[in-house]
């Protein structure tokens, strides 16, 4: 998609980062600002689910869901808000 956008004259980048890691979110934001000068839009789209019945859901499963869905959104939003 990035290649197609660039061929059309648009600026585009793609990065991978662990959204649960606040330092990784901050680094990603810095790379975006370095490459593009600013952030116009942040889409918090990272989420996972633990597809199990409650009695089968482990504490680890639940922690992973919260870390990805909530902590990831917080880390990315906090890093981007400083820009």
Image (spheres, rainbow, N blue to C red):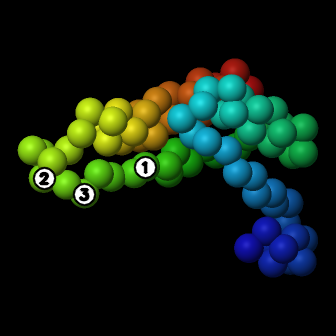
Q: Does dot 3 land on a helix, a strand or a loop?
A: loop
Residue at 89%, 77% (x, y): give it. Answer: 7
Residue closest to the eye, 23 or 53: 53
Disc 1, disc 3: CB below 8 Å?
no
Q: Is residue 56 left or right of residue 24?
A: left
Q: Which residue is identified by label 3?
A: 51
Can you identify the residue that label 1 sits on? Answer: 47
Q: Nearer the viewer, mark 1 or mark 3?
A: 3
**Is residue 80 among the parts visible in the rendering?**
no
Q: Which residue is mark 2?
A: 53
Q: Residue 83, located in which quarter of the rendered image? A: top right
- The crowd level at tag 2 (other Cα within 10 Å; few <14, some 14-19, many 20+) is few
Q: Earlier in the sequence, mark 2 or mark 1?
A: 1
Classify mark 2: helix, strand or loop.
loop
Would residue 19 be found to the left or right of residue 24 on screen? left
Q: CA distance from mark 2 to mark 1?
A: 18 Å
Mark 1 crowdedness (10 Å alpha carbons): few <14, some 14-19, many ≥20: some
Viewport quadrant of the N terminus: bottom right
């Amino acid at each position: 998609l990035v290649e197609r956008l660039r061929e059309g004259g648009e600026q585009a980048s793609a990065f991978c980062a662990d959204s649960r890691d606040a330092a990784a979110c901050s680094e990603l934001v810095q790379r975006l600002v370095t490459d593009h000068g600013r952030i116009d839009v942040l889409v918090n789209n990272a989420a996972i689910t633990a597809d199990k019945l409650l009695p089968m859901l482990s504490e680890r499963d639940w922690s992973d869901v919260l870390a990805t869905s909530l902590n990831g959104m917080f880390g990315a939003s906090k890093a981007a808000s400083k820009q």
